[in-house]
C-alpha cells in the first residue's frame, strides 16, 4: 500500500512508520521538520495547516498521528478540522487516538470517571473533540485507534495484543495497558485488514508488561 503518515516523527507515528516499512509498504512522511526524520524515505515538509487537497489525494491510506501539547494543545481542534476538510469522503484514513473517550467498565467514558487524573483531563477532553470531528464529518472509511488506559513508551513489544471496540480493553488480569510498539504493530494490522472501518477501536495487551 501507498501510505502517508502525518506526524511520522512523533512517538507513535515513528513506530507506525517503522512497522509499515518493515512490512514493505510504500511510506511517505508528512512532517514539519525534516531534520527529525531518521529514515531515508520520501517526505513532504509542510505544516498541516498548509496542506492542500493535492497533498493528500495520491495515497491509498492516510495516518494522522499528529498531537500538540502544553500551550499548543488548543491547536488540535483546528488542525483536525483542517485535515478532515481536505479528504475525499471515501478516503481511507486512520487516526492515532487517546483512551479517554473509551467506555470504562463503569459504563461511563474513562475521561469522565471519578478517579480520572486531573493533570491529563484537558488532553482527554480534547481527544474527545477530535473524535467528534471525525464522527460528524462526511468521511466513510475512517478508523480512530485508541490505546489502552496505560500507554507505555518504554515497554517492549510482546506481540500478545487484542482489539476491542469503543470499550476500554481490559485483559484477564484486570489490566488495561499496551506498549507503543505493540500498538504500532496492531495499528498496521488495522491498516491492512480494515476490520473497524467507520468506527473507534482500541488495543490492549493480553499480558502484563511488568
Image: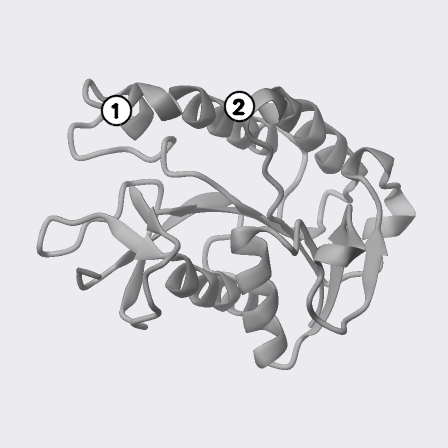
- Label 2 vs label 1: CA separation? 17 Å
Taking 8 as reference, is 193 left or right? left
Local secondary structure at mark 1? loop
Query: Residue drawn at (41%, 59%), measured in percent from left and top?
Result: 183
Instruction: Give the quarter of the figure containing the C terminus.
Output: bottom left
Residue 85 visible here: yes
- Residue 129: mark in rendering: 2
Residue 148 visible here: no
Taking 16 as reference, is 6 left or right? right
Query: Residue drawn at (38%, 64%), measured in percent from left and top?
Result: 182
- Residue 12: mark in rendering: none
Which is nearer the eye, 120 or 137?
Answer: 120
Q: Position of residue 140 (x, y in %)?
A: 63, 44
**Residue that numbered label 1 is attached to:** 116
Q: Position of residue 24 (x, y in %)?
A: 64, 81
Taking 3 as reference, is 95 left or right? left
Amino acid at each position: 500500500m501507498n501510505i502517508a503518515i502525518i506526524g511520522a516523527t512523533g512517538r507513535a507515528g515513528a513506530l507506525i512508520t517503522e512497522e509499515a516499512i518493515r512490512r514493505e509498504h510504500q511510506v511517505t512522511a508528512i512532517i514539519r521538520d525534516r531534520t527529525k526524520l531518521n529514515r531515508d524515505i520520501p517526505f513532504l515538509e509542510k505544516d498541516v495547516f498548509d496542506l492542500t487537497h493535492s497533498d493528500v489525494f495520491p495515497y491509498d491510506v492516510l495516518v494522522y498521528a499528529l498531537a500538540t501539547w502544553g500551550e499548543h494543545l488548543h491547536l488540535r481542534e483546528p488542525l483536525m478540522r483542517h485535515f478532515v476538510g481536505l479528504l475525499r469522503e471515501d478516503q481511507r484514513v486512520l487516526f492515532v487516538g487517546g483512551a479517554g473517550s473509551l467506555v470504562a467498565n463503569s459504563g461511563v467514558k474513562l475521561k469522565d470517571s471519578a478517579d480520572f487524573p486531573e493533570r491529563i483531563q484537558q488532553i482527554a477532553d480534547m481527544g474527545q473533540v477530535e473524535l467528534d470531528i471525525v464522527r460528524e464529518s462526511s468521511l466513510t472509511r475512517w478508523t480512530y485507534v485508541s490505546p489502552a488506559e496505560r500507554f507505555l513508551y518504554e515497554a517492549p513489544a510482546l506481540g500478545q495484543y487484542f482489539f476491542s471496540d469503543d470499550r476500554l480493553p481490559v485483559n484477564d488480569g484486570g489490566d488495561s495497558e499496551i506498549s507503543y510498539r505493540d500498538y504500532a504493530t496492531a495499528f498496521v494490522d488495522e491498516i491492512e485488514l480494515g476490520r473497524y472501518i467507520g468506527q473507534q477501536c482500541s488495543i490492549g495487551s493480553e499480558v502484563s508488561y511488568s
